Structure formats: C-alpha cells, structure tokens
Amino acid sequence: MGTQHCRPDLPVLMLHNLDRHWPADAISEALDLTNRLSQALLEIGHPTEMVCVEGNDLNHLLKDHRPDQCIVFNWCEEIPSLPRSADRVAAQLEDLGFVFTGADSKALALSQDKFQIKQCLIGKQIATPRWEIFGRPHPVGWEVFPAIVKPVFEHCSFGITHESVVYDARQLRQRVEYVLDTFHQPALVEDFIDGREFHVSVIGNGRLRVLPAAEMDFSAFTEPSGRLCTYDSKFDPTSSDYQLIDLKLPAPLSGEEQNHLEATALAAYRAASCRDYARMDIRLRDGIFYVLDVNPNADLSPDASLALAAEVAGLSYGQLGSLLVNLAAQRSPKFDQLGKNPLPDGVVEDV
C-alpha cells in the first residue's frame, strides 16, 4: 500500500487539546503523542506547526493562520473541561473555513450518541446486537442474558468494567442504576456477543481501503465478563486486562470471513458518514458479524490498532499521517492536487 500520489509538502497545523487540570503524567503523555505524529509528518516533508487548544475560542487561537495556507490535522478530542465536545471543535473549524482531517461536525455528533448510531446501523440493515435504552432504574422487559450495560454517550470504553456484563435481572437493575447515578445519562443495554472481537480500520472517501483487521485475543479469560475491552484494557498498563489481552494482527480469518468482515466494516463506515478514516469494533457469533461501535477520528497513536494495521499494510506512521492530510486537502480547491486520489490500487469504489 503506497502513497505515490500524496503531496509531501502540504503545510499542516497539528491541532491538539490539553487540559491543565489533568495529572502531570497525562499531560506529558498527550504532548509526547502529539510530538510523535508532528515529527513523523515533518520527516515526510510537511511543514508542521503544533497548535494547542486550551480554551473554547478557536477563532482567537487561529487568528494568525489562513485557511488557504494550511491543512488542519484535527488531533483534538474535545474542548478542555467540556466532555464530548469533539463535534464543537469541528464545527468551529468549519465556520472558520479551515480544511481539516477526519469526520465533520455532524458525523462526530452522531458518533457520540449510541442511540443514533444504532438507528443508523439498523436503517442500513447492518447487524448490531439487540439493544434497548433505559433512562430509569427499572429495566422492565429485558430478558436476554448475558447482557452488557454501557453509558449511552461515552466512548473509549469509559464506564466499561467486568461488572458491566450482567447475568440476571437483579444484576441488570443494579448496573443500570449505577450508570444512571454515576454518569447522569441513560444506560444502553445490549445482548453480550460472547465471540471474537475485531477492530477494523477503513481509510478513504468514495474510494475506500480496509486495513488488515486486528483481533482482540481474550483466551486468557475464562468468564464472559473478562472477554471484553474495558477502559483499563486501553489505558492502564498496570491492569490485568491491559496485560492479558493480546492483539492478533492480521487476524486469522478464512477468505469468506475476511470478505464478510470487510463488507460489514465498509457498510458501517458509510452508514455513519465517516470521512478520511475510522475504526469499527465488530464481534463474530454464529457466523454473523455484529457492529458494536463506529469510531470516526479513531485513536491514531503509534501503538493503537489503526496505526499498527497501516504498518502491516505497508504504511509508515508518517505516511499514514500524510495520506490523511492529502485526503483532507482534496476537499478544497485551494490546494493544488496532482489530480489523482491518494489511495492506491486495491480499494473499493463507493456507490
């Protein structure tokens, strides 16, 4: 997978967020990750400047930058101290006329609401676990167990622990009450798909490329409640979840399974109006691939599954970043493109 049609000279503003209320180690890690991606783009040839979002006024922050002179690499997860505000960052960039990488504000707002994502998937006849939303502490009528209970507006497995998997009505009621009391938002209850889990990344617009699928190997866990990606498994290197879940990349799949999984990922990408790149979390049970979640602007850290999958596909970290910059640049006539889509052969034509 090459990047022969990419321009390496496009100027980039690396927009990232930082909250001074974070612990010192979290601030240090965030800066390190931003520096690593910026350096990777510089090594490709992109003039790159880091711009840190520490307030909510992007107009003032970007007043010295012109939209016709740079591509914004939207590395900004939220406005500091304003949870679930990634869409507001994108909306301000749109209002200011900047071209930026990743999903637009509407797609980011959609992705924050699991209810809306479920509706999109169902509307396109894409398999997703049976589900229901409960806004009161008495989940009447649910009879599918084991089930998993999640906060409806959170991502990155925030609020997901082993206790999220419940086996009877009593545990279900307790966990729904916990979500309502702790996160002050409705609870999403799903049929727990106790099967293989895959993280499938897609790149492109119109012409799409599915990267090699990564499989989360839960074989170290004997109970269903252990076979899931908890918050600790993603962010706490000292936790047993982080240490015991292995990553298989590429995932061992038959040709038929590979084709079915890729088709499911592409359908979900389109249904959620993703742009440039995204990651789909998908589980397999009884021959059916169920979409658990759609993640536009997915984690691009060097050790995250998307970057690792790109590496398996032949893209260095810098080449991956450059490809995303070039995909964004195609949305503006202000940037002189080569007249070719930067994605290589082997892509899927959108219809």
Image: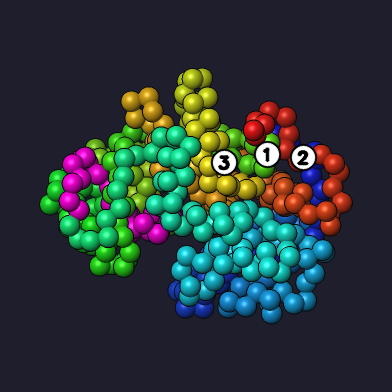
Q: Is residue 12 left or right of residue 256?
A: right
Which residue range is magenta in the image? 139-160
Q: Amino acid at mark 2?
A: Asn
Q: As displayed, is residue 336 above or below residue 11?
A: above
Q: Which quadrant holds residue 129?
A: top left
What residue did someone put label 1 on?
206
Per the image, is 104 magenta? no
| Numbered badge on residue 137 | none
Extreme-top residue of the structure = 255
What residue did someone put label 3 on?
270
Q: As displayed, is residue 321 above or below residue 32?
A: above
Of the numbered discs 2 and 1, the one sitting upstream in the chain is 1
Of the numbered discs 2 and 3, the one sitting upstream in the chain is 3
Q: Which quadrant holds residue 14?
A: bottom right
Q: Nearer the viewer, mark 2 or mark 1?
A: 1
Q: Amino acid at mark 1?
A: Gly
Between the residue at mark 2 and the residue at mark 3, the CA separation in whole angstroms equals: 18 Å
| Numbered badge on residue 341 | 2
Query: At 31% from the left edge and 45% from the top edge, which residue is drawn?
Result: 131
Query: At 80% from the left edge and 69% from the top edge, which residue is drawn?
Result: 66
Q: Is residue 28 visible?
A: no
Q: Position of residue 344 (x, y in %)?
A: 73, 34
The colour scheme applied to this rendered structure is: rainbow
Query: At 36% from the left edge and 57% from the top edge, which residue is drawn?
Result: 152
Q: Which quadrant holds residue 186?
A: bottom left
